[in-house]
Image (cartoon, rainbow, N blue to C red):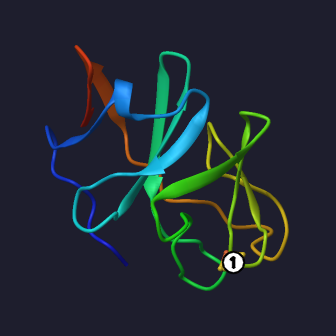
Amino acid sequence: MRPKPPPGTILGRLDDLPDPGARASAWEGRAVVLIRRGETVTAFINLCPHAGLPLCLPDGRGLLHKGETLVCPVHGASFDAASGECTGGPAAGDRLTAIPVEIVGAEVRAL
Ligand code: FES
Protein backbone atom coordinates (compact mmCIF):
# COMPACT_ATOMS: atom_id res chain seq x y z
CA MET A 1 0.00 0.00 0.00
CA ARG A 2 1.38 3.36 -0.99
CA PRO A 3 1.15 6.29 1.44
CA LYS A 4 -1.47 8.98 0.96
CA PRO A 5 -0.10 12.48 0.44
CA PRO A 6 -0.21 14.74 3.50
CA PRO A 7 -2.79 17.56 3.38
CA GLY A 8 -1.53 20.53 1.40
CA THR A 9 0.76 18.45 -0.84
CA ILE A 10 0.84 19.93 -4.32
CA LEU A 11 0.02 17.03 -6.64
CA GLY A 12 -0.01 18.89 -9.92
CA ARG A 13 -1.10 21.90 -11.90
CA LEU A 14 -4.29 22.16 -13.92
CA ASP A 15 -2.42 23.33 -17.01
CA ASP A 16 -0.20 20.22 -16.93
CA LEU A 17 -3.20 17.88 -17.10
CA PRO A 18 -4.91 16.88 -20.34
CA ASP A 19 -8.60 17.81 -20.40
CA PRO A 20 -10.20 15.37 -20.29
CA GLY A 21 -7.40 13.09 -19.36
CA ALA A 22 -5.35 11.35 -16.71
CA ARG A 23 -1.74 11.65 -15.67
CA ALA A 24 0.42 10.43 -12.82
CA SER A 25 1.47 13.01 -10.28
CA ALA A 26 5.17 13.64 -9.83
CA TRP A 27 4.69 13.22 -6.07
CA GLU A 28 6.52 10.18 -4.60
CA GLY A 29 7.41 8.63 -7.92
CA ARG A 30 4.00 8.83 -9.55
CA ALA A 31 2.16 7.47 -6.52
CA VAL A 32 -1.05 9.31 -7.41
CA VAL A 33 -3.05 9.46 -10.62
CA LEU A 34 -4.93 12.70 -11.35
CA ILE A 35 -7.99 12.75 -13.59
CA ARG A 36 -9.13 16.05 -15.04
CA ARG A 37 -12.53 16.71 -16.55
CA GLY A 38 -12.91 20.43 -17.08
CA GLU A 39 -12.39 22.21 -13.79
CA THR A 40 -12.96 18.99 -11.85
CA VAL A 41 -10.02 16.86 -10.72
CA THR A 42 -10.22 13.55 -8.93
CA ALA A 43 -7.23 11.68 -7.56
CA PHE A 44 -6.49 8.09 -6.64
CA ILE A 45 -3.55 6.05 -5.42
CA ASN A 46 -1.82 4.91 -8.61
CA LEU A 47 -2.24 1.19 -8.02
CA CYS A 48 -4.73 -1.12 -9.63
CA PRO A 49 -6.46 -3.30 -7.02
CA HIS A 50 -6.33 -6.28 -9.38
CA ALA A 51 -2.60 -7.01 -9.26
CA GLY A 52 -1.19 -3.98 -7.47
CA LEU A 53 0.40 -2.50 -10.59
CA PRO A 54 0.44 1.15 -11.73
CA LEU A 55 -2.65 2.51 -13.46
CA CYS A 56 -0.55 4.74 -15.71
CA LEU A 57 1.80 3.96 -18.56
CA PRO A 58 5.57 4.24 -17.95
CA ASP A 59 5.53 7.79 -19.38
CA GLY A 60 2.89 8.83 -16.82
CA ARG A 61 -0.14 8.92 -19.10
CA GLY A 62 -3.40 7.44 -17.91
CA LEU A 63 -5.95 5.94 -20.29
CA LEU A 64 -9.22 7.83 -19.85
CA HIS A 65 -11.99 6.41 -22.03
CA LYS A 66 -14.67 8.89 -23.14
CA GLY A 67 -13.64 11.18 -20.30
CA GLU A 68 -15.44 8.94 -17.82
CA THR A 69 -13.53 5.71 -17.32
CA LEU A 70 -9.94 5.11 -16.29
CA VAL A 71 -8.67 1.91 -17.91
CA CYS A 72 -5.81 -0.04 -16.36
CA PRO A 73 -3.18 -0.63 -19.07
CA VAL A 74 -2.14 -4.00 -17.67
CA HIS A 75 -5.25 -6.20 -17.94
CA GLY A 76 -7.94 -3.68 -18.84
CA ALA A 77 -9.95 -3.21 -15.64
CA SER A 78 -12.07 -0.07 -15.85
CA PHE A 79 -12.84 2.40 -13.09
CA ASP A 80 -15.34 5.23 -12.78
CA ALA A 81 -13.34 8.47 -12.97
CA ALA A 82 -15.44 10.14 -10.28
CA SER A 83 -15.83 7.40 -7.67
CA GLY A 84 -13.02 4.97 -8.48
CA GLU A 85 -15.49 2.09 -8.46
CA CYS A 86 -14.56 -0.77 -10.78
CA THR A 87 -16.99 -0.88 -13.69
CA GLY A 88 -15.57 -3.87 -15.55
CA GLY A 89 -12.71 -6.29 -15.98
CA PRO A 90 -10.68 -8.34 -13.55
CA ALA A 91 -10.98 -5.95 -10.57
CA ALA A 92 -14.78 -6.30 -10.41
CA GLY A 93 -16.15 -5.59 -6.95
CA ASP A 94 -13.15 -3.50 -5.98
CA ARG A 95 -12.39 0.22 -6.18
CA LEU A 96 -9.50 2.64 -6.31
CA THR A 97 -8.28 4.43 -3.20
CA ALA A 98 -9.48 8.02 -3.48
CA ILE A 99 -7.36 11.01 -2.47
CA PRO A 100 -9.48 14.07 -1.65
CA VAL A 101 -8.13 17.12 -3.46
CA GLU A 102 -8.88 20.81 -3.88
CA ILE A 103 -7.91 23.26 -6.57
CA VAL A 104 -6.16 26.36 -5.29
CA GLY A 105 -5.43 28.78 -8.11
CA ALA A 106 -3.93 26.46 -10.73
CA GLU A 107 -2.61 23.91 -8.21
CA VAL A 108 -4.15 20.59 -7.30
CA ARG A 109 -3.55 19.97 -3.60
CA ALA A 110 -4.30 17.05 -1.32
CA LEU A 111 -6.84 17.71 1.42
S1 FES B 1 -3.30 -4.92 -12.85
FE1 FES B 1 -4.93 -3.65 -13.50
S2 FES B 1 -6.30 -4.97 -14.47
FE2 FES B 1 -4.72 -6.26 -13.77
On the image, the x and y values in percent for residue 102 come to: 31, 26
In which quadrant of the rendered image does the N terminus lie? bottom left
On the image, the x and y values in percent for residue 9 come to: 16, 43
Q: Is residue 29 above or below residue 68?
A: below
Residue found 63% across the figure and 61% down from its top? 95
Q: Is residue 2 above or below residue 106?
A: below
Residue found 62% across the figure and 36% down from its top? 82
Seen from the viewer's position, the closer of residues 38 and 15 is 15
Left/right of residue 44 with respect to residue 6 in the rendered view? right
Seen from the viewer's position, the closer of residues 86 and 71 is 71
Q: Is residue 100 above or below residue 23?
A: above
Left/right of residue 44 with respect to residue 8 in the rendered view? right
Seen from the viewer's position, the closer of residues 76 and 4 is 76
Answer with the quarter of the image where residue 87 lies. bottom right
Residue found 56% across the figure and 66% down from its top? 55
Answer with the quarter of the image where residue 78 lies. bottom right
Residue found 69% across the figure and 52% down from its top? 85
On the image, the x and y values in percent for residue 111 come to: 25, 36
Mark 1, residue position: 74
Label 1 crowd (10 A; few <14 / some 14-19 / many >=20): some
Can you name the residue that lies furthest to the bottom here?
Answer: 51
